[in-house]
Amino acid sequence: MSSAPIRNEIRFLLNGREVTVRDVAPDATLLDWLRLDRSMRGTKEGCAEGDCGACTVLVGKLTAGGLVYESVNACIRFLGSLDGCHVVTIEHVQPVGGDLHPVQKAMIDFHGSQCGFCTPGFVMSLYGLWMKDANPSDATIEKALQGNLCRCTGYEAIMRAARAISDYGKGASDPLAVERAAVIEKLTKLRDGARVEVGSGKARLVVPADVDDFAAVLEAEPKATIVAGSTDVGLWVTKHMRDISPVVFIGHLEGLRRISEKDGVITIGAGVTYTEAFDLLSQRIPALGELINRIGGEQVRNMGTIGGNIANGSPIGDTPPPFIALGATLTLRKGAERRTIPLEEFFIAYGKQDRQPGEFVEAVHVPVPAKDSRFAVYKISKRRDEDITAALGAFHLTLAADGTVAQIRIAYGGMAATPKRAAAVEAVLTGKPWTEVTVEAALEAYAQDFTPLTDMRASAEYRMLAARNLLRRFFAETQGGSEPIQVSRHQAA
């Protein structure tokens, strides 16, 4: 039993004021609350699924490194997840009676807005970028704007505005910089160590006090919907109109937001976001850094968690295949009891995972590949950025001294009802010389491993062809060619 006190209200900062909400539905989104309850209509609704960025706001949270502001999609961010946060909307960018903010002025002077519908979202994304990097490169700007779409300007005008912000910002008065100390003090006071419970019966939401409290809540309510980043669950509400009550929000739990490395294994807490994991993963396993940069837009990466991507069990989840190829393990917790299993065994069938009632994903443990091994991940999608995967292949190869395959692990997403290893292909390759002849001979074994489906993203025939060609590509890239098989826009330039 948890001994945490219980509070029956959500408390957070909205721009310059503290807000207390006592009557909030478990599936109430921040966007609807802003527009309908607060009449703050600068934040727009475009896609209602976290793709277009018109609803972008900044959310500030206290972390071990201090107060951090991140761009998020208000359309799929639930109000219940904001306890103890600072929500900043477009209305707060320009101080009352003050001059335009440097981001706003640059967007006007460089004609970065035409119809204006998407403009507030672009301003908020650029504001978030400007606070982190006052003089960003073009690649950094484009990454920050991956999750913002505009049908009018062709983007180049927005890029020119983004490049100019650093000059406009010299000596400018920034509201979040001026208020920073006061905001930190207010957010610190909001941390009372209480569990939040709002509503009654099935129609309620819970914000646990800590991880132990979360374990106790889930044991008592094993059918509750667990929401970490809501980048998928948000769409259950906005697109599928699903009833997700009761809801347990866990994105704030520090005990699930730790990432560390010990003895060559990176342990990622289930609440660690893609953004939080990026630095360590991209440094130690560079291929994963490249993959994370293609998962959603910046807003989605700021909200979405690696543990949620695994627990969701989607056959097209981007992180399970590379983790499986690296031999990752998964720690599951129920109450005070824990068990650790190979990640590949977690996925049983479509929509079914090896998770008992009241049990939750606590952490994933990812071995860093040895220096003498080769590891690569390839994502196939219609758009390069911010698109759902059609097929994804991950390859981890270790060669013996004589050039034969000592070990190879191959895993795919989008090729079966779950993320799955290519066991038959691996069997053909293992022990054989790592040559083009061997690789070509292994291609027939794909039919034993996979029977892909046809859907709106790709046909079964295309998926099978692409999967085989990814093995060919991986082989080609292990042959030491001086030119990359595929280059990005910036590499090409």
Image (cartoon, rainbow, N blue to C red):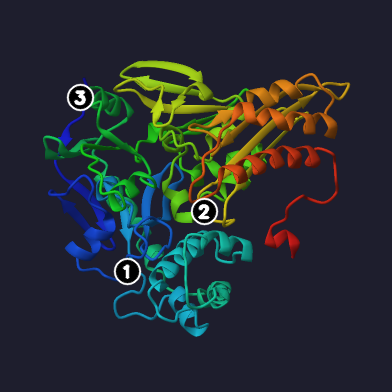
What is the crowding at mark 3: few (fewer than 14 residues within 10 Å), some, or many (at least 20)?
A: few
Viewer-side residue, 403 vs 84: 403
Residue 3, which numbered label? 3
Quarter occupied by residue 304? top left
Q: Quadrant of the C terminus?
A: bottom right
Quarter occupied by residue 447? top right
Residue in the image at 47% along x and 38% along y: 306
Residue in the image at 81% along x and 29% along y: 438
Viewer-side residue, 410 vs 489: 410
Q: Which residue is mark 1?
A: 92
- Image position, residue 279 (x, y; %): 58, 44
What is the crowding at mark 1: few (fewer than 14 residues within 10 Å), some, or many (at least 20)?
A: some
Q: Quadrant of the N terminus?
A: top left
Tag 3: amino acid: Ser
Q: Is residue 206 left or right of residue 362?
A: left
Q: Say which element carries label 2.
A: loop
- Image position, residue 346 (x, y; %): 46, 23
Q: Is residue 240 left or right of residue 118?
A: left
Residue 387, which numbered label? 2
Q: CA distance from mark 2 to mark 1?
A: 31 Å
Viewer-side residue, 316 vs 249: 316
Does residue 263 sit above or below 315 in this rendering? above
Q: Say which element carries label 3.
A: loop
Tag 1: amino acid: His
What is the crowding at mark 2: few (fewer than 14 residues within 10 Å), some, or many (at least 20)?
A: some
Does residue 186 sit above or below 313 in this rendering? below
Q: Is residue 207 left or right of residue 469?
A: left
Q: CA distance from mark 2 to mark 3?
A: 44 Å
Identity of the residue furthest to the left in this view: 200
